[in-house]
Image (spheres, grey):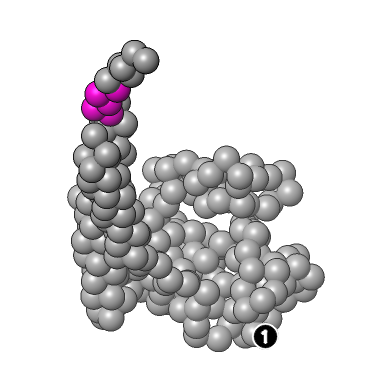
Amino acid sequence: MAERAAAAPKRFPWLALILAGVAFAVLIGLGTWQVERLKWKETLLATIDERIHSKPVPLAQLVKLFAETEDVDYWPVTATGVFDHAREQHFFATHDGAAGYFVYTPLVQDRGETILVNRGFVPFDFKDPATRIEGQTEGPVTVTGLARNPLDSKPSALVPNNDAAKNIYYWKDITLMAKQSGVPEAKLVPFFVDADATPNAGGLPQGGVTIIDLPNNHLQYAATWYGLAATLAGVLGIWLWRRSQTV
């Protein structure tokens, strides 16, 4: 009986090793990216916390700051002027579980400079200003609130387009809002103000609607990606060891 031919040696699985190495590098990269995002988010949260606990500053000071940095988000601010209630704009929103609108009203200052002020929330049935006459403050007023940066573009394709004809906005397009309010571009303050919770006559609009809730889950995400990388390395190591025992 002829002797059986000796079994050919197993080829080293270079392809599997290369693919595993690529996957490991990707997982490590994702974990490192989340660590960087964690540092960014912690800095952002610290900045917001510092700002919202600062004393309100005059609007003119923030206008100058915005011209330099394009960032005045969450700075407390005071602005004095006269509301142009006839030209208010309505942003679709929910507040305390109810659906309705945030009312953005032009506040015209002495020299004509105008800022769009989010005076607060009104339910659907109170979209028409005629239903809340008491809250249509006349004469000079001083508003205290938080400055909010404008958006450069629609935040997502899932967000509906603004319907200027019906005066309903789904994202805060300051250019369109100002145009519909009749505010000349040269006179427009290039950011918004969210009014604080100081009650308006008649109770509407309901101010103080700014929500500061920025989730910070980057540490968990980083741990997940690094954990997957460690698991992959462990599985690959065990597989290579077992393979070496059978060669």
Towards the viewer: 34 or 214? 34
Q: In which quadrant is the N terminus drawn?
A: top left
Quarter-of-image position of residue 39: bottom left
What is the magenta range? 7-14
**Residue at label 1?**
202
Residue at (54% x, 71% y) in the render: 119
Question: Could one spot residue 31 in this view of the protein?
Answer: no
Q: Residues within 10 Å of mark 1 (few under 14, many from 20)?
A: few
- The picture places residue 19, in percent across and down from the top left corner, at 31, 32
Q: Position of residue 145 (x, y in %)?
A: 41, 74
Query: Which amino acid type corresponds to the residue marked 1 in the rendered image?
Result: Gly
Quadrant in the rendering for residue 110:
bottom left
> Residue 227 location in percent, x, y?
30, 58
Q: Give the main secondary structure, helix, strand or loop, of the magenta stretch.
A: loop
Q: Where is residue 225, by image quadrant?
A: bottom left
Q: Which residue appears at 69% of the width and 74% of the height?
A: 98
What residue appears at the point 43 percent right and 59 percent down from the top-left corner? 192
Q: Is residue 24 above or below residue 148?
A: above
Instruction: Say what secondary structure mark 1 lies in.
Output: helix
